[in-house]
Image: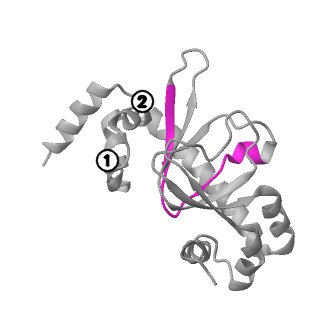
């Protein structure tokens, strides 16, 4: 019997990569359900990333720790219906340079990268999935870099709450400040300014 998690995953695979039912059936044995507790990690710190995950329920932050200052810097947030992994670690077989932490108890469907490679060999649909996943991560990184170079902190805040309006209810203000590259008091000022704009 197909679980609710599998149904959600299958719907997203159809939408994300236009996978056929036959393509999806090829992968069924490889997906495993996993629960990640609040403040636990999708990946093992300082090790190879060996999995691709699909978020059925929950939200994660992707961040790195500056080795000189030991300060945490949030790069992205990932929530329901998104795929998460450390693409660089998967492709280069090097240790993951950042951490993927659950901010809520989260439900995932997870596949080993070796199994995904096996699917690439068997299906053009899965090859397309891999290409689209890589393109998605490239675009995310490009947009993130450009936003830090060309936008003010207020503009980055407006973009965040416009594209992810639920995030203020799910992510602490300290994590949002880190993502925006500012200090807590600056975020309070920005939120007040945005609230008073017509």
Q: Which mark is residue 144?
A: none
Q: Quadrant of the N terminus?
A: bottom right
- Relative image position of residue 87 (x, y in whole percent): 69, 48
The vertical placement of 46 against 157, above or below, is: above
Label 1 vs label 2: CA separation? 16 Å
Q: Quadrant of residue 62?
A: top right
Counting labels gives 2
Mark 2 surroundings: few (<14), some (14-19) or many (≥20) residues within 10 A: some
- Which residue is drawn at the image coordinates 61% and 51% (left, top)? 137
Q: Is residue 86 magenta?
A: yes
Q: Secondary structure at mark 1?
A: helix
Relative to the observer, which residue lies in front, 198 or 175? 175
Query: Looking at the image, is mark 1 or mark 2 earlier in the sequence?
Result: 1
**In front: 45, or 126?**
45
Residue labelled with disc 1: 168
Residue 128 vs 114, above or below: the answer is below
Q: Which residue is mark 2?
A: 181
What residue range appears in magenta? 72-90
Q: Which residue is drawn at the image coordinates 70% and 78% (left, top)? A: 24
Q: Determine if the magenta segment contains residue 197.
A: no
Residue 182 placement, left or right of 88? left
């Amino acid at each position: 019997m197909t679980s609710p998690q599998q149904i959600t995953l299958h719907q997203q695979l159809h939408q994300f990569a236009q996978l056929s039912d036959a393509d999806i059936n090829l992968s069924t044995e490889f997906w495993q359900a996993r629960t990640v507790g609040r403040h636990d990690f999708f990946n093992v710190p300082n090790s190879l990333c060996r999995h691709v995950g699909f978020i059925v329920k929950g939200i994660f932050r992707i961040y790195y720790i500056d080795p000189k200052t030991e300060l945490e810097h949030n790069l992205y947030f990932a929530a329901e219906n998104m795929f998460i992994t450390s693409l660089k670690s998967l492709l280069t077989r090097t240790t993951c340079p950042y951490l993927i932490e659950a901010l809520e108890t989260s439900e995932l469907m997870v596949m080993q990268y070796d199994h995904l490679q096996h699917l690439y060999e068997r299906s053009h649909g899965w090859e397309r999935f891999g290409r689209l996943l890589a393109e998605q991560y490239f675009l995310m990184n490009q947009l993130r870099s450009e936003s830090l170079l060309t936008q003010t902190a207020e503009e980055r805040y407006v973009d965040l709450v416009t594209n992810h309006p639920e995030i203020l209810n799910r992510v602490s203000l300290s994590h949002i400040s880190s993502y925006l590259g500012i200090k807590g008091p600056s975020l309070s000022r920005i939120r007040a300014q945005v609230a008073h704009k017509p």
